[in-house]
Image (cartoon, coloured by chain):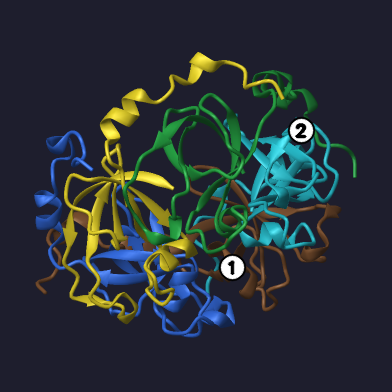
Chain colours: A green, B yellow, C blue, D cyan, E brown
Amino acid sequence: MEIRQVVGSLVCTHRVAGLGHWDLRLLQDTKGKHYVATDPVDARPGDWVFVVSGSAARYAMGDAGILTDLTIGGIIDRWEEERAAAVEPTAFGAARAA
Amino acid sequence: MEIRQVVGSLVCTHRVAGLGHWDLRLLQDTKGKHYVATDPVDARPGDWVFVVSGSAARYAMGDAGILTDLTIGGIIDRWEEERAAAVEPTAFGAARAA
Amino acid sequence: MEIRQVVGSLVCTHRVAGLGHWDLRLLQDTKGKHYVATDPVDARPGDWVFVVSGSAARYAMGDAGILTDLTIGGIIDRWEEERAAAVEPTAFGAARAA
Amino acid sequence: MEIRQVVGSLVCTHRVAGLGHWDLRLLQDTKGKHYVATDPVDARPGDWVFVVSGSAARYAMGDAGILTDLTIGGIIDRWEEERAAAVEPTAFGAARAA
Amino acid sequence: MEIRQVVGSLVCTHRVAGLGHWDLRLLQDTKGKHYVATDPVDARPGDWVFVVSGSAARYAMGDAGILTDLTIGGIIDRWEEERAAAVEPTAFGAARAA
């Protein structure tokens, strides 16, 4: 899964029937690229979330008939802190002994 | 899902039977890269749309036998305005408290 | 789907049984990166084509047992002209009114 | 599959039901980009791992109902040594004779 | 499918059951990025190969229960020669007449 920030919602009157009236969240990655995702966890602008793609995205909506390829899987509680606390990759050098 | 702009249509006389006579829209991303998508919502050149990929793309055509991997999922009503109104990512800093 | 140019064919004596004796076309994108695709439409070097990926690639071969993840979906009749005629993205500014 | 380093875990109170209470590992690639993966092999921060994506990611959790698109497939025993010992690509020039 | 060079093998004692004791080949693309693939054609370091991804990767192992998302599909007989002989893309300009 990948990490995005919710930056808004999209209004799309003309859409395929398979998306019903589901909210379409506008997300952004750290390089400013935009994505569109369905949202079963009621995320709000500013929330950092992780997204699920592929066939799992449809199941994550609770109904495989919902025609999305990207769904918000959850809201990260304290992303700024967890990002800062993330292990400094080089600190570990070689992986653990077998 | 990702966001593209419709920039034309493609004429492809030699094509696999699984695509029938469906229109093939020519799309472009913000870096100028081209994509080809099937179009169940009758989008027109200039429209900003979001696209659905993978197996969901086939279902979005209403017939999983249509052999596409990218389908226009909907037309964004006012993309320029919504892009401008999108939350400034850094404005929120830490995600909401749990 | 994405757009590629056919630049040759590949000889692969050691291959998985699931690819039988199908021709393997060598394709190239506009950045010079190479791809390998199965070809049910008899494309020739120099042809501009669009490719279908994922599970649709297997179905596009007419037999889901053919173990490809990329299949030529069709030959674009006049790509140079269609690329030139493609709408200048900024020309349209805001999307159409709802 | 691709290679990542485990750099921590994520706390996500609001998540889709399909992820249950599974630990969510925070991974990083060699360019510093972050990913989120489910972990059936109990990897620890600092471990170099390979990840499985797509539908195989769900099966790798032992239960296709677990809604992930990225799962840790295994821990690489001595990645630093194996990376250093990897064949210098140009050393071989042409592939072996048929 | 994409083209890679085999540069070694990986030792992974801790791995998901769905990968059994299959060899895990270490591959590299032309930009030096590493990948991990299962290998049903017994490729050796230095071989140029093409890889199959997605659900086709599992079928290419002859057993869809083998939890890989990348499998070596075949060994390219003379990649250096075929790459050199590949059509110079611009040589053809417009695609053939319909």
**In this orientation, does residue E88 appear?**
no
Element at badge 1?
helix
C42 vs B70, nearest the viewer: B70
Chain under numbered label 2: D
Q: Is residue C81 left or right of residue A40?
A: left
Q: Which quadrant would the C terminus of chain B be assigned to in this image?
A: top right
Chain under numbered label 1: E
**Front: mark 1 or 2:** 2
Q: In the image, residue C43 lies at what x, y percent?
A: 26, 74
Q: In the image, residue A30 lies at what x, y percent?
A: 50, 27
**In this orientation, does residue B52 appear?**
yes
Q: Amino acid at mark 1?
A: Ser
Check residue E55 in the rendering and tell me which mark sits there, or answer none: 1
- Name the residue located 33 percent from the left edge and 30 percent from the top edge: B82
E28 in relation to C53, above or below? above
- Name the residue located 21 percent from the left edge and 65 percent from the top edge: C46
Do the CB atoms of the residues marked 1 and 2 lie less than 8 Å apart? no
